[in-house]
Image (spheres, rainbow, N blue to C red):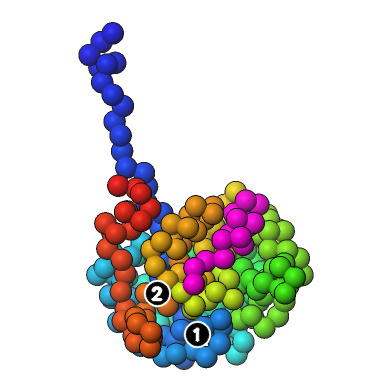
Amino acid sequence: MTAEAALPPLLLPKRRPRVIPTLLLKDGLLYKPVRFKAPKYVGDPRVAVKIFNDKGADELVLADMTATIERREPDYELIKEIATESFMPIAYGGGINSYDQAARILELGVEKIVLNTALASTPALSEKIAGVFGAQSVIGCLDCRKSLLGGYSVYVEAGRRRMGGKPEDIAQRIVGQGVGEIMLQSIDREGTGQGYDLALVRRVAGAVDVPVIALGGAGNVDHFRDAIGAGAAAVAAGSMFVFTGPHRAVLITYPPDEQLHRAFGTR
């Protein structure tokens, strides 16, 4: 046996799952609701992006929560400003219903387009975007609500209109339409800090072969670990990164990398 063969294999740390802040826009400013209701003012998105930049956030999701309902186009100037200043990969959603809109946003420096309502109203859109920019550039956002009987429904138009079908079936369908990643949000848990809906994560993550990002309910880093254990490839959160204390005072923050590695057991 040679000396080289006798050496133990090099042990490298596992890759840490992505932890993604989500910021919600309304009239060009940041707001955060609870269960899609009663949005509370948070601040200027430019300031928040700078803080997340400085703290080394993995990625950022920026979504205009009223653009689709108000039939408005995305705020391209704001998107351009944020994309230019950001060192993080950015995903944008809200008000996108055509290929030209999506292409314009991607050409501004945004890396991923987030589709929700368009998945139902314009099902060919995701496939067209993916065909030009690649499936990795398209995130399908499934906003889910649990019924009294224990089943789940998927909603579009900011939780106002229900789609037909089970979340796992819809997830499979949109993956077939070019979606390269799924953001799975629990409306019931959103903004509560009570933890992700792990049963929902298991159902959808087990049904598709693309990464699933868990969203809705994170209150601490242990919740991140729970979601990954349920099958999510990454985790996202809003309130946890912008509020602190029982009175939900605004404090924009992001966990240190070492804390995240300890939570995931990756170092």
Q: Measured from the top left, where is residue 158 in percent x and y? A: 61, 81
Q: Is residue 89 left or right of residue 160?
A: left
Q: Percent from the top left, x then y, of residue 215? A: 51, 68
**Mark 1 Cα-neighbour bin, 10 Å: few <14, some 14–19, many ≥20:** some
Mark identifier at residue 240: 2
Closer to the camera in the image, 160 or 250: 250
Please give the count of numbered marks on the rendered protein: 2
Element carrying mark 1:
strand
Residue visible at 55% across and 74% down in the picture = 189
Residue occupying the point 50% across, 58% down: 227
50 sits to left or right of 198? left
At x 45%, y 69%, the residue is 218
Q: Which mark is residue 225?
A: none
**Amino acid at the residue labelled 2:** Met
Q: How many C-alpha atoms fall within 10 Å of the one at disc 2: few (<14), some, or many (≥20)?
A: many
Extent of the magenta region: 194-208
Residue lying at the far top of the rendered structure: 1
- Report the side of 144 relative to 10 (left or right): right
Quadrant (top left, top right, bottom left, bottom right) of the N terminus: top left
- Res 45 visible: no
Residue 134: give x, y in percent of width and height.
54, 55
Residue 71: image quadrant is: bottom right
Along the polypeptide, which appears first: circle 1 or circle 2? 1
Where does label 1 land, which residue?
Answer: 33
